[in-house]
Amino acid sequence: MRWIAAVVMLLMSVCSCSSAKDAEPADASPYTCIPPARPSAPTAVQKRIAVIGDSFTGGSPQGGTGDKRWTAVAASLLQGGGVDAVMKVEAERGAGYVAKGKRTGQVFADKIPVTVTSGDSVVEVFGSINDASATAGQMAHATCDTLQNAEIAAPAAHSVVI
């Protein structure tokens, strides 16, 4: 359960900081996490979070099922913390960066076009124990491709890799 709390804290911090694209005075430092003063109350912006993973993400005894699944718990905790967050989850048993999922035969990179959109605030990739038999070279290539494709699909999103 500690890792669920860690994921939620990380997502809350990523979702709550202002991004470089937010309107800010010309003299503001690009590295500040303090939002610029706004003349009126800010409107709530929904944070869209794309999550790609394996059975720990999609539902299993280890990652929980139904409303006990870690993604459902994280979404609920974010909402309770005042972050208007919606998660789109694409997960498959057996899937990884290199390992093909048991249902569709897809790897994580294959799931990007149906999961990640340009308006996403966060793209999270969770996995993968399923890649235990992959070589270091296979993992390096597949991980790089996955993260580059996610960045192309959602260039303004923060990446979270677990």
Image: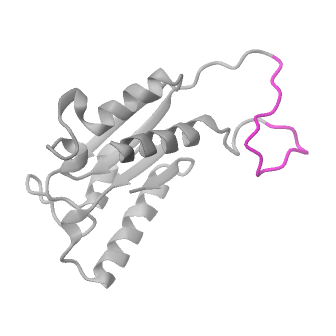
Most extreme residue toward the right is: 27
Check the image and report above or below for 85 versus 146.
Answer: above
Looking at the rendering, which quadrant does residue 82 occupy?
top right
Going 76% across and 38% down the picture, which residue do you hit?
34
Looking at the rendering, which quadrant does residue 43 occupy?
top right
Q: How is the image coloured?
A: one colour
Most extreme residue toward the top is: 40
Going 73% across and 15% down the picture, which residue do you hit?
41
Q: Position of residue 53 (x, y in %)?
A: 27, 52
Main secondary structure of the magenta stretch: loop
Q: Position of residue 158 (x, y in %)?
A: 53, 49
Going 41% across and 70% down the picture, which residue do you hit?
144
Q: Quadrant of the N terminus?
A: top left
Q: Quadrant of the C terminus?
A: bottom left
27 in the magenta segment: yes
Most extreme residue toward the left is: 103
Q: Position of residue 70 (x, y in %)?
A: 30, 38
Q: Position of residue 56 (x, y in %)?
A: 22, 49
Q: How many marks?
A: 0
Q: Between residue 161 and residue 121, name the one nearer to us.
A: 161
58 in the magenta segment: no
Going 38% across and 45% down the picture, which residue do you hit?
2
Q: Between residue 161 and residue 103, name the one nearer to us.
A: 161
In the image: residue 133, left or right of residue 103: right
Check the image and report above or below for 53 versus 65.
Answer: below
In the image: residue 113, left or right of residue 35: left
Can residue 85 be seen from the camera position used here? Answer: no
Can residue 2 be seen from the camera position used here? Answer: yes
Q: Between residue 130 and residue 141, name the one nearer to us.
A: 130
Looking at the rendering, which quadrant does residue 76 occupy?
top left
Magenta stretch in the rendered image: 24-39
In the image: residue 108, left or right of residue 18: left
